[in-house]
Amino acid sequence: MNAPRFLTLNDVAEELQVSLSQVRALVRSGELPAIQIGGRNQWRIERTRFEEYIEDRHSQTRQAISAQKSSKRSKAKAEA
């Protein structure tokens, strides 16, 4: 069976194991691209955009960890 093209905010919250309000905040900020359908706060997130968001977060996390390690090494050299 094929996965649905669009996810609800509840689907995304469940997948990320975060609250619905956290997902809404990601959508409102533009960090997680979504489309609004209908008039009653109905939002959908395209599965491919969701996967891209996850990949971006992985990349940002790797960069942050790398920067922390580099900073610690520089500090250790300066103290030596």
Image (tube, rainbow, N blue to C red):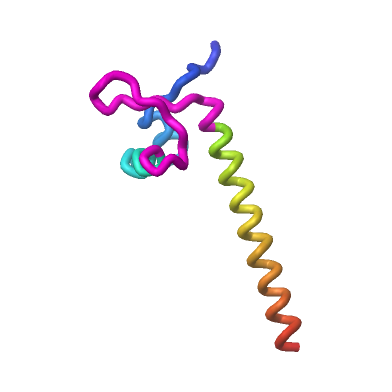
Q: Position of residue 27 (x, y in %)?
A: 39, 38
Q: Position of residue 51 (x, y in %)?
A: 56, 32
Q: Position of residue 20 (x, y in %)?
A: 33, 38
Q: Going by the picture, which residue comes out furthest to the top? A: 1
Is 32 a magenta residue? yes
Q: Going by the picture, which residue comes out furthest to the left? A: 40
Give the camera-side residue of 44 and 20.
44
| Position of 69 relative to 16 (above/below) | below
Q: In the drawing, does residue 48 fall left or right of residue 70?
A: left
| Position of 20 relative to 69 (above/below) | above
Regarding residue 57, the answer to whether it shows in the image is yes
Q: Position of residue 48 (x, y in %)?
A: 56, 26
Number of marks in the image?
0
The residue that appears at 65% across and 53% down in the rendered structure is: 62
The residue that appears at 54% across and 38% down in the rendered structure is: 53
The residue that appears at 35% across and 25% down in the rendered structure is: 36
Regarding residue 18, the answer to whether it shows in the image is no
Give the camera-side residue of 29 and 4.
29
Query: Which quarter of the rendered picture does the C terminus lie within?
Result: bottom right
| Position of 18 relative to 80 (above/below) | above
Query: Which quarter of the rendered picture does the N terminus lie within?
Result: top right
Q: Which residues are magenta?
A: 27-50
Is 73 a magenta residue? no
The residue that appears at 72% across and 85% down in the rendered structure is: 78
- Rendering quarter of residue 13: top left
| Position of 64 relative to 24 (above/below) | below
